[in-house]
Image (cartoon, rainbow, N blue to C red):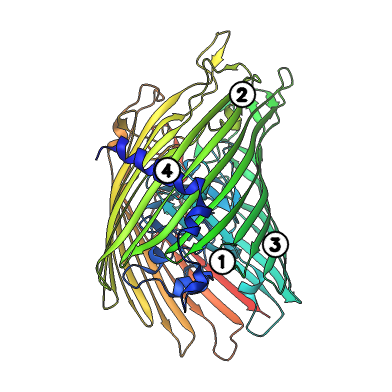
């Protein structure tokens, strides 16, 4: 079957669900008609067939990715148990052990996430269900997230469901923060904790305080975290200037749930990183006389979300309403010889959705509408030539996603969405575009309790993405109009389980067409500067992994081989901005063991990156500097954690990071493939000591 025919069948079938979910619900008996059938999400999980993995067989459970789990998709979830084991301090530690997910950047404010080799800006990213629109400056990370109160992180790599939101070109990525009920001790209505963390390498101290409770249907949570410290030292003994810590973050939540199950929740999260960084925050480039080595970066991110859900749905009535506002801004002075220009870029998104899940005997259909109103602004306060620019985009979408178990040992998911976007350029030109997306995936238990096969494909229409703030140019023109970006995704895999062993293998491919990569200018002097530059990305690869679990511990080994091409040439970090980064072959090894009688947990992980020379290829638009291959490295970490049985509310932990003092730059970091550019080395050997007291 040709890809074009497959996409046509996918879209037409999915849109039939979109147009008439109520009719579909009418075609099957009501859930109450069969004894023992429940409409609650928890019971549907319990009834999921045992032939597939737990996550793959969950048809209707929220996993934090702004959508429900999708049978047959390549789903990676970092759940609460995993977060408690890792105690992550940044995004890279959140996703440690998952070679399909690479996090580049030596410090939290410069970290970017790549899924199957594709930059997160090509995924539908949410925090507590709120769309994130954070493409501010390519030398910074796209958002700064404090994982201290992270409840779950989930990725649907490649194929994402229609209800994941607009722009899911290469999948979806979602973060969910904890609620008060996740932290309260059993039988208690009030609690709190205090934590302190000391890092010996950078002499950084971080402290966090939280209080939470519930009473008469009300819930509340407050949390604040503050970190302060100096530069860290790399494995070769070199101090890395501009890597100090000056970070404060906070989270506040309030919720009310009536006895009938109507739940209203309002949350506000805020993070600020305000410190000296290298002039280009994620690399060192020496330009004496023109630019200082360091400048101050003031990075702020906020996220406000209102959510309504019905925790006691009946029949076909299971609504969800989300209204949210997110914003990320970076203030950093621009220098040109003796001229200093205060500059601030800000991206914001007002977004929301209204959807309902229709329960069926064989699964469910979720249908609804969503919208976003995104803005990217730049204030450039040059003393002689100040300017203000902005691009804006508004999108309205309608979608439906079916998650069904039509036959024994078979689970399928398919859906579609239609989007209409209004885009406004820096010259106030307006462009309207519309498109349709579709997806289908499924899994089948070839041998129940032992072997499951799965596959999926999707076609995604992503509209016109906003340009990076710090590259906006008031002279831009748009010619015949910016081209909407589209993508095609393909995944396939199998999973085998036996006596505590789990073996997984997956292959994947993502094709993104007409991806927008704007540049500030095309050379001078020119009367007009076009903003239109499009590239095509192909990212493909495969992953295998084996894990053994027993009552007290686990051992896991995973390997991924990921290659990305831009316009037919191997990608490098310059041409791949906001698209991809060269990854190659990566091995992740992890293990953990719990001594229950002593209250002791021990474990560790190893990351191995093999060297690659694909970066030696040159693109016509690359800088003139020479290219170099990426060296391999091996990094070993370990931890021990103790919760005294006599004092279960007190925990001590020690992490030994980069035990063998490897001098390396993580594989997904920007700029390391060009001669003359010096990216941050990652921290050398460090011991992290932490203590947590709960009350």
Residue at label 3? 265
The disc placed on residue 425 is 2
Q: Residue at x 55, y 8 (%)?
A: 525
Residue at label 1? 315
x, y percent for residue 309:
64, 62
x, y percent for residue 106:
49, 49
Give the number of callouts: 4
Q: Is residue 199 left or right of residue 218?
A: left
x, y percent for residue 664:
39, 50
Pointers 3 and 1 in contact (C-beta within 8 Å): no
The secondary structure type at the circle numbered 2 is loop
Q: Quadrant of residue 117?
A: top left
Residue 143 appears in the picture as rendered: yes
Pointers 3 and 4 in contact (C-beta within 8 Å): no
Q: Which mark lies nearer to you, 2 or 3?
A: 3
Residue at label 4? 438
x, y percent for residue 317:
60, 62
Q: Earlier in the sequence, mark 3 or mark 4?
A: 3
Q: Quadrant of residue 636?
A: bottom left
Question: CA separation, marks 3 and 1?
Answer: 23 Å
Q: Earlier in the sequence, mark 4 or mark 2?
A: 2
Q: Earlier in the sequence, mark 1 or mark 4?
A: 1
Residue 302 appears in the picture as rendered: no
Q: Earlier in the sequence, mark 2 or mark 3?
A: 3
Question: CA separation, marks 2 and 1?
Answer: 46 Å
**Circle 2 residues within 10 Å: few <14, some 14–19, many ≥20:** many
Q: Is residue 289 left or right of residue 86?
A: right
């Amino acid at each position: 079957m040709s890809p074009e025919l497959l996409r046509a069948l996918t879209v037409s079938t999915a849109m039939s669900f979109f147009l008439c979910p109520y009719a579909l619900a009418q075609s099957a008996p009501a859930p109450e008609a069969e004894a023992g059938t429940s409409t609650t999400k928890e019971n549907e999980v319990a009834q999921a067939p045992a032939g597939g993995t737990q996550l793959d067989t969950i048809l209707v459970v929220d996993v934090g990715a702004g959508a429900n789990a999708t049978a047959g998709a390549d789903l990676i979830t970092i759940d609460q148990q995993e977060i408690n084991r890792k105690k992550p301090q940044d995004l890279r530690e959140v996703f440690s052990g998952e070679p399909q997910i690479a996090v580049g950047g030596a410090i939290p404010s410069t970290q970017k996430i790549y899924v199957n080799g594709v930059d997160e800006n090509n995924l539908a990213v949410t925090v507590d269900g709120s769309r994130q629109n954070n493409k501010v400056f390519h030398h910074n990370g796209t958002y700064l997230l404090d994982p201290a109160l992270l409840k779950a992180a989930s990725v649907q790599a490649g194929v994402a469901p229609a209800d994941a939101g607009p722009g899911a070109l290469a999948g979806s990525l979602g973060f969910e923060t904890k609620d008060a009920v996740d932290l309260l001790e059993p039988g208690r209505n009030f609690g709190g904790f205090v934590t302190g963390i000391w890092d010996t390498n950078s002499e950084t101290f971080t402290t966090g305080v939280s209080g939470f409770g519930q009473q008469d249907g009300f819930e509340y949570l407050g949390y604040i975290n503050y970190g302060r410290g100096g530069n860290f030292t790399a494995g070769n003994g070199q101090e890395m200037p501009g890597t100090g810590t000056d970070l404060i973050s906070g989270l506040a939540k309030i919720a009310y749930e009536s006895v009938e199950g109507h739940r209203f929740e309002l949350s506000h999260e805020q993070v600020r990183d305000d410190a000296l960084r290298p002039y280009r925050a994620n690399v060192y480039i020496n330009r004496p006389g023109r630019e200082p080595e360091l400048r101050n970066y003031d990075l702020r991110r906020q996220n406000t979300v209102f959510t309504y859900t019905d925790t006691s749905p009946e029949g076909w009535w299971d609504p969800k309403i989300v209204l949210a506002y997110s914003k990320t801004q970076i203030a950093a002075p621009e220098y040109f010889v003796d001229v200093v220009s205060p500059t601030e870029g800000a991206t914001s998104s007002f977004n929301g959705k209204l959807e309902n899940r229709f329960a069926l005997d064989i699964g469910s259909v979720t249908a609804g509408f969503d919208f976003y109103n995104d803005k990217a602004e730049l204030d450039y306060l040059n003393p002689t030539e100040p300017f203000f620019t902005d691009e804006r985009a508004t999108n309205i979408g309608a979608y439906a996603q079916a998650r069904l178990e039509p036959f024994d040992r078979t689970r399928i998911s398919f859906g579609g969405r239609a989007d209409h976007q209004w885009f406004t350029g820096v010259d106030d030109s307006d462009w309207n575009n519309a498109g349709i997306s579709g997806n289908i995936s499924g899994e089948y238990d070839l041998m129940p309790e032992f072997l499951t096969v799965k596959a999926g494909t999707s076609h995604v229409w992503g509209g016109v993405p906003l340009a990076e703030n710090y590259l906006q140019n008031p002279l831009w023109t748009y010619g015949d109009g910016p081209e909407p970006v589209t993508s095609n995704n393909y995944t396939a895999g199998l999973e085998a389980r036996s006596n505590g062993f789990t073996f997984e293998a997956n292959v994947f491919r993502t094709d993104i067409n007409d991806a927008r990569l704007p540049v500030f200018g095309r050379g001078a002097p020119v009367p007009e500067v076009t903003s239109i530059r499009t590239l095509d990305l192909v990212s493909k690869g495969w992953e295998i992994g084996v894990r053994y679990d027993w009552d007290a511990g686990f051992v896991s080994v995973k390997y991924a081989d990921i290659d990305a091409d831009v316009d037919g040439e191997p990608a490098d970090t310059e041409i791949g901005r906001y698209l991809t980064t060269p990854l190659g072959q990566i091995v992740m090894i992890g293990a953990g063991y719990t001594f229950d009688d002593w209250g002791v947990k021990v474990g560790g992980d190893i990351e191995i990156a093999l060297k690659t020379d694909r970066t030696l290829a040159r693109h016509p638009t690359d800088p003139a500097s020479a290219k170099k291959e990426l060296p391999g490295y091996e990094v070993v970490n370990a931890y021990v954690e103790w919760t005294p049985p006599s004092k279960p509310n007190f925990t001590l932990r020690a992490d030994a990071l980069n035990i063998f003092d490897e001098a390396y730059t993580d594989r997904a970091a920007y700029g390391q493939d060009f001669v003359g550019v010096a990216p941050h080395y990652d921290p050398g050997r460090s011991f992290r000591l932490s203590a947590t007291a709960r009350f």
